[in-house]
Every structure is written in structure tokens, then in C-alpha cells.
Amino acid sequence: MIKRRGVTVSRQIMDSQRLHPEATGDLSGLLNELIVAAKIISAEVNMAGLAEILGQSGKTNIQGEKVQKLDDFANATVKRRMEQCGYVCIMTSEEEEETIPVLEGYEGKYTLAFDPLDGSSNIDVNVSIGTIFSVHRKLSEGRKGTASDLLQKGSQQVAAGYIIYGSSTMLVYTTGEGVHGFTLDPSVGEFFLSHPDIRIPERAKFYSINEANTNYWFEGTKKYVEYLKEIDKATGRPYSLRYIGTLVADFHRNLISGGIFLYPRDRKTTSKPEGKLRLLYEAAPMAMIAREAGGMAITDDGRDILEIEPEYLHQRVPLIIGNCQDVEMARHFYLGS
């Protein structure tokens, strides 16, 4: 028998905890509970067609979007797993209007914001989808968490990550000490370290944006995309367009291979003047991952995503995220400086 090599995610979490003698183990426990939820969701995603759960549930979420059946399942799975784990005091989900309390007597010292199934519009066509999560420390007094505990800047996150369900299931997360990727081995039901210390390439290969919206773009976006299509003097080629339409999948490819993702404001989204993506559930956790991997994330008016003070749970923002060089160049085109 071939000896199995590789570090499990549980071992990685424990090794990281040992570097902090003051740690209580609560954050480690929280992450391990999320990992169990990810395994359950992954199994259901892989069986979706056979289980006849593809398609819409008939419900509409707070964003006014039709909720897919797998959305319902993923949302319920995370809630069930975390509401009595003892590490979380309050939660919020992209799929629900109000905050989500934990069970009485199980209040912990962290908060959890999550997008249970990012890219759910791609479920029926078997395109990669994912779960995104963000963790903050509780700030309020008393046992129970409040909305104010959730409305913290991204720079105050203690952990962030995503699980991508694709050709394989992969977990990527950070606790502020680098970014690590783990791939699920379904034969043993365990995540093994496959991408240690991920660093986003300094030079990009790809740009990711929905070019179907070209006619609605503002001048900054138009000029920047035109710039990306020019021949790069360093590489002798232009950037290549790669756009999946699932934030997790587009960001993951760019994180590993090098690229920049843009979802700016445009004339088409005048009904959503703040932008399209959600600050707490998508932009802030991805921004933390980008920062820890050597990249950055800004809005199309130059603000640092991690320094935006959330005003309400479902706040939206424009998002430009990738390696520092390309994001700074984008800032130049948007601000004209």
C-alpha cells in the first residue's frame, strides 16, 4: 500500500493554533465545524442531478433573486452546523434578510457571515460554485451577539475563506498568516494540503469581467479594459479574457494563475448604485484572502475594500481585486490620476 502523504486541514489548523499560546481553540473549532458543513454540501452538490434537486425552490431571497434548491440546502446546512457549535454568537447569510441567532446556551465569541452557494445561477449547467465565509470577533457586551458585531470592517476579520465545488472540492482560507489551499479526497473524506502558502502572481495572465455589459460601462472601465487588451511589453501578449460568472471560480483561477477580477458599477445597475456584490458575504472575505496572498481589492472609486465600514447587512459594493500592480493601474484609470 502506498503511504498517503500530505497534511490534513485539521492538522494545519492545530499547528497554527500552537503558534499562539494564548489561543483558546475556539477559532480552530469554528473552522473545523465549517469544514464539516463544506463536506456535506460538497456531497450534495456532486449528487445534485441524481437526487433531483436541481432547479428553483420557488422562494425569493432578500436580494430579489430566485433561490435555487441547493441554495436552500447549503444555507440550512451551515446554519444547523454552526448554531450549536458553541463558537459563534450570531450569524448572517446572504440568503436571509435578518440576522440569524444561535441556540440558547451555545453563544460563542465569534460572528459568521456567509454566502452559502455563490454562483447558484450556474448550478443547472454544472459550472463551479462555492461557499464563502467571513469571521469576526464579538465586540458587544453580554452573551448574545448583535447586528453591530457583524457590521465590522473587513480589516478586522480574524478568518476568511471559500470552498469551491468544481472538478474537485477545494478549501482556501486564511487566518491572517498566509493563504493555504486544501483539496478534498472523497475516498477518505478529508481535506489535504495541496496549495501551501498561496501567492497571487505579480504579473497577470487574465482579466475577468462581464463584457456583455460593455455598452453600459463608464469611461474608466472602458479605458482600463482597452489597456488590458494591448500588448504587454513584459510578456509580448495582451491579457486574456476569462469570465465564468461565479465570483469564487473567477477569483480562484486568478489567485492561482494570475489575474484581475472586476465588477464595477455601470449604467445598467443604476437601480443598485452601490454596486452588485455584497460587502460582508463576498467582497470583504475575498479582499482578506487577496491581501494575505500579496494582492489587494478596491472599489471603482478607489476605496480599500477592507476599510469600508458596513452600514447594513446586505450592503453592496463595486469590486476590483487581483495582484497589486494591476489593481493600482485600475485605480489610475478610474480616478484619472
Image (cartoon, helix red, strand yellow):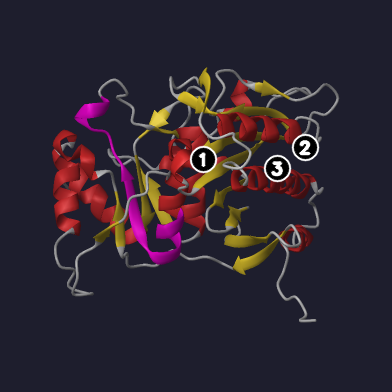
Disc 2 marks a residue whose amino acid type is Tyr
In the rendered image, the quadrant that contains the N terminus is bottom right
Numbered circle sitting on residue 37: 3
Residue 255 in the magenta stretch? The answer is: yes
Q: Position of residue 296 (x, y in %)?
A: 40, 53
Q: Quadrant of residue 253?
A: bottom left
In the rendered view, tell whether residue 200 sits above or below residue 76.
below
The answer to whether the residue labelled 2 contacts the one labelled 3, judged by CB atoms less than 8 Å apart, is no
Q: Earlier in the sequence, mark 1 or mark 2?
A: 2
In the rendered view, tell whether residue 132 sits above or below residue 292.
above
Rounded to the nearest angstrom, the CA distance separating label 1 from label 3 is 23 Å
Residue occupied by mark 2: 87
Disc 3 marks a residue whose amino acid type is Ala
Q: Position of residue 203 (x, y in %)?
A: 32, 67
Residue in view at x 39 percent, y 48 percent? 297
> Is disc 3 placed on a helix, strand or loop?
helix
Q: Position of residue 74 (x, y in %)?
A: 62, 35
Numbered circle sitting on residue 154: 1
